[in-house]
Image (cartoon, helix red, strand yellow):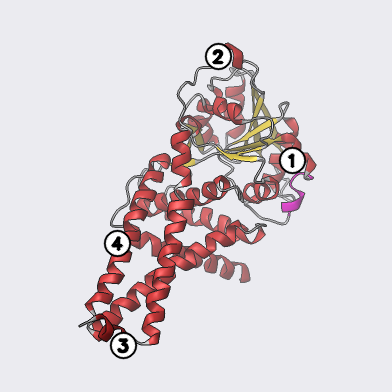
Amino acid sequence: MNITSFIDRISILDWIVIGLYLVFFIVQLIYYLYLFRKPYKHAENNAVVNNTIEESEKKLPGISIIITAKNEAANLRRNLPSILNQDYPNLQIIAVDNASTDSTAEVLDGFRSSHPNLYVTFIPIGSHAINNKKLALTVGIKAAKHDILLFTEPDTKPLSNKWVYEYAKTFKKEIDVVLGCCQLEIDKSYFKKYIQFDNLFSGIKYTSMALAKKPYMGVGRNMAFRKDLFFDNNGLSSVLNMEDGEDNVFINRIATNENTVVLSSPESMVASNVVDGISNWRNIKTKYLTTRKYYTGNSAKILSFEVFSRFSFYILFALLCAIAVISSFKIIAFYAILLFLARYLVQIFVINKNSKVYNAGSFYFSLPFMDLAAPIVDNLFLKKENNNKKR
């Protein structure tokens, strides 16, 4: 079949499908090769060569670490020593016992007796009329004696004793917000691979946008900002109507293209043991998904368009394969498969390079499934949450 005959036999609708498939292929390449490659490239450039505190660096700023804990005795025993043993000279650690009913208070008192830089305060049991997490964060921030506030959670531990030092080096005069990354430690779960991918891709998205000068969120397990920003923005008053996710949305309010940087060196990493299965991962994801409507700016919209272009690409691939079979045009099948494989190879490269940053394992043949499953699962979680609220 010559080219002229082939062109004559292709309908206008088929040409539209062929053209749209190419458009969404290019859009996907832009996302992966321009946007989603930023985190791993930044991590490579962010790698620490010398992490020894020199005499000239003794003037690094004081930092206050803030941890709120509600019934977290076991996690505090496991993870707090990694924070208390940080190699940093000017450090205050604030632990807020958020109306715990377990042995959290006793555990904190035990650590306080041997670590004078640990300051412990508490929210009284029975303060349930107020959002306890926001109240605990506010109490912790007001107790901070340093300008730089570094946040983490009881279920999270730094992977290096230079964690605080990495943040201190990053806070230049013009920097007010530093966004870190969080790995997941999952012992056993049938859904471990999916959960690791979901956490990885979430991390890729928010760090990519921040590196593109469009920051829109952070994770409360590893982030820092200046105390003045908290009071200049009337504390957490702008997120008082939210049940959860105040860390994400508060960063959305204060982060700008000029005052925010990403920190992803190995020494700045933390790891969380918060997930032990699909059930509590669903709860965590649902809290995150329900806060997206509060984001301002266009970063979330840009990422939503990625999902749209991704699904469009897959649907058009299926349509082209169907057209090729029905019309016996092998060249259309070749075209569809060629672009599919090209995107797939780019995706494998970018995802796995980023995965090394998050220690999330390797992704190859599972990638198309993950691609399609993640947005569907997110929508199912949201639908279930909305149904629960209506009851």
Q: Earlier in the sequence, mark 4 or mark 3?
A: 3
Residue tagged 2: 54
Q: Earlier in the sequence, mark 2 or mark 4?
A: 2
Q: Residue at x 40, y 49 (%)?
A: 196
Residue tagged 1: 230
The one of 11 and 134 positioned closer to us in this rendering: 11
Q: Amino acid at mark 1?
A: Phe
Q: Amino acid at mark 3?
A: Asp
* In this rendering, the label closer to the viewer, 1 or 3: 3
Q: Is residue 78 left or right of residue 165?
A: left
The one of 244 and 168 positioned closer to us in this rendering: 168
Q: Residue at x 61, y 50 (%)?
A: 214
Q: Earlier in the sequence, mark 2 or mark 1?
A: 2
Residue tagged 4: 341
The residues tagged by marks 2 and 3 sit, at their Cα atoms, a distance apart of: 74 Å
Q: Residues within 10 Å of mark 3 (few under 14, many from 20)?
A: few
Q: Amino acid at mark 2?
A: Glu
**Secondary element at tag 3:** helix
* In this rendering, the label closer to the viewer, 4 or 3: 3
The residues tagged by marks 4 and 3 sit, at their Cα atoms, a distance apart of: 28 Å
- Residue 119: where, in percent of width, then height? 67, 25
**Does the stretch in magenta take in 54?**
no
- Residue 227: where, in percent of width, then height? 73, 35
**Secondary element at tag 1:** helix
Label of residue 8 in the image:
3
Task: Magenta stretch: give its range.
Answer: 234-240
- Residue 71: where, in percent of width, then height? 58, 40
